[in-house]
Amino acid sequence: MKLVAWERARERRETRWWSSRWLVAIVAGGTFAAIVAARSNDATAASHAWLALSLVATAWAFMRVPFHIYWRTDAALLAQLPIGGDELFGAALRRCIRAAAATTLACLVGAVPLVTAMPLGLVAHHAIVAGVLGLAAAALLPAVTTWAAMIVVVTDRHGGGAPALPGSASSVLGALPGFASAVVVVLVVIASPWLVGTDDGDGLAVLGGLAAASVISIGIARASAPRVMGAILRDVSALDRQRLAKLEIDPPTRLERAIGTLLGAAALPYAKDARLMRRRYPMAFALGTLAFVVLAIVGLARPDDPTPWLAAVLGGGALYAAVLANRLRRPPIELPRLSATLPIDARARTLAKLAWTVAWLAVYLAIPAAFALARGV
Amino acid sequence: MLATVKNLTIQYGRRVAVDALDLELPAGEIALLLGPNGAGKSTTLAAMAGAVLPSAGSILVDGEDLATAPRSARAKIGFADQPPQLYEFFTAAEHVGFVAEARGAAQGAATAMLDKLGLGAIAGRPCRELSFGMRQRVGLAAALVGPVKIALLDETLNGLDPHASRAARATLRAAADAGAAILMSTHLLGVAERLCDRILVMDAGKLVADKRGDDVRALLAQGPHALEELYVSLIPDTATA
């Protein structure tokens, strides 16, 4: 079966010219370039801005890797069909590589204004970092993500058909790639002095190590994953359908109740959205907490140049809030056909979603950012 | 009349799904909507519930126009979609409770409705864990809970086990006896025979038969397959012709 050809056909049907990943990458890169250009009178500041934006873009690509490999909407269907593991893994890897290439393109376009701010040799350093980040998104993260799934499958086999700890299986699928992403980001931040030529080459060694690790890891995954790729899709889609995962049915929090009392007619849809978001997208709260902690640390540590940290966290947080706002409008949080038949105004539904998004932004970004600013950052 | 549909027309592009349909639903009546796949039954039900906008025509709910007074009109309508629209991450009780509260139902209405339909034991389970038949029943509970005067049910009795089917039929009959109008599409002619006060048959977006009262009783008195014979006589067999 030519799975890749089928995927191409589906992508052609699903994608409009304005949602092409390449166009999105160029537009995003153009936005990066404008921000970098605004700081181009100071080479270090421009470089820091570029790095922060590139890390945000790459972190987004990292987060998408599990969705290219096993959290696919068609995972359950693919798992039922007699498609070889080689082909399944190849198609998944192709999706990762294309997404990574688009991200790298955005980073490279964003680096163009650096030409006016620093020597070409240092601009090349930025291009190398963009390449290494792209390589990590195309190779290292897919490998780690595949291993995470393999761990779940192996646990499944030992458990006699069902994971012994389904909750922990779900955690492995999200946490292991998340941990690898964090390691990559930290290593690139450690190597960042090399971007402006202020280290003695250690940065290049770190980046070289990262690139080598990416190539080696995908080679290992490529050799072993095809044997279990079908099982990965089947088991993970079973978890994704939540037949096995445990769902915490907990009451609304005090904050949610307090916000609800302020919303009048929107209180009911808000209470619904708040409960469903907490259950369906627990990662929103984990990532929010991470952003809160980073901003709080910036506020406490008061680094010499806090811009990359603030830009990365606030920019990434705002981008993620936009994603969450979009999720609030779609199933399983919003059911348009059911909502259309209920006596709840469209304005009340919109206000509920706005309140949820604003509350998320306030709690996880605005409050710690205000703390950092109050500390003189 | 609890529901009055006048000249209802629904087009999807060039295709006419419902073609100038006129229909009235009085209080206390259970009307079964029969017809082949693609006849326009689901579209009619969805439009009467406000989930699909008509291309032309009007829908009056207890005297209120669904298009101009949607909020007050919608509180009186219960719709069980196909497949049931359930908040997957809510428990059955939470889902039905949310719908009940939206309709301004009394406290405890959701629990009472779940109990009536024999769903008390699964009330605390997330909807995503429920089987097909259980989801159908939760959808039915959500459609009937609260001050619903018109229940629109799209193949809602499909997939129910005999006990669940009996409980559902009893609940529907009780709702009709309390003054609700019920319009339900189904292909389960055996169930239809035991439940209906009125039989509507649609084909190609039009109503081709409307039997009620003595006509229905006379038809059902002809024997266990009378409804099937009526259906076959009205609807050409395009699948095997």
Image: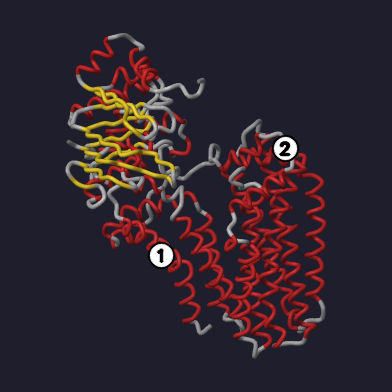
Task: In this rendered view, identify the residue nearer to me: B17 or A286.
Answer: B17
What residue is pinned by disc 2?
A: A83
Assess whether mark 1 and mark 2 are in contact (beta carbons under 8 angstroms): no
Task: In this rendered view, identify the residue nearer to me: B30 or A243.
Answer: B30
* Residue A102 % position (x, y): 68, 64
Residue A140: name its quadrant: bottom right
- Residue at figure coordinates x 77%, y 43% from the top left: A86
Q: What residue type is labelled 1?
A: Ala
Its colouring scheme is secondary structure
Left or right: residue B20 compared with residue A96: left
Q: Give the vertical position of B172 relative to B111 (above or below).
A: above
* Residue B165 % position (x, y): 36, 22
Residue A359 is tagged as 1
Q: Give the vertical position of A292 relative to A123 (above or below).
A: above
Q: Which amino acid does label 2 sit on?
A: Ile
Residue A361: name its quadrant: bottom left
- Residue at figure coordinates x 68%, y 50% from the top left: A8
* Residue A254 % position (x, y): 36, 58
* Residue A373 % position (x, y): 49, 81
Q: How crowded is mark 2: few (under 14 residues within 10 Å), some or many (20 or more)?
A: some
- Residue at figure coordinates x 74%, y 83% from the top left: A196
Residue B229: name its quadrant: top left
Left or right: residue B9 compared with residue A65: left
Do discs 2 and 1 share a chain?
Answer: yes
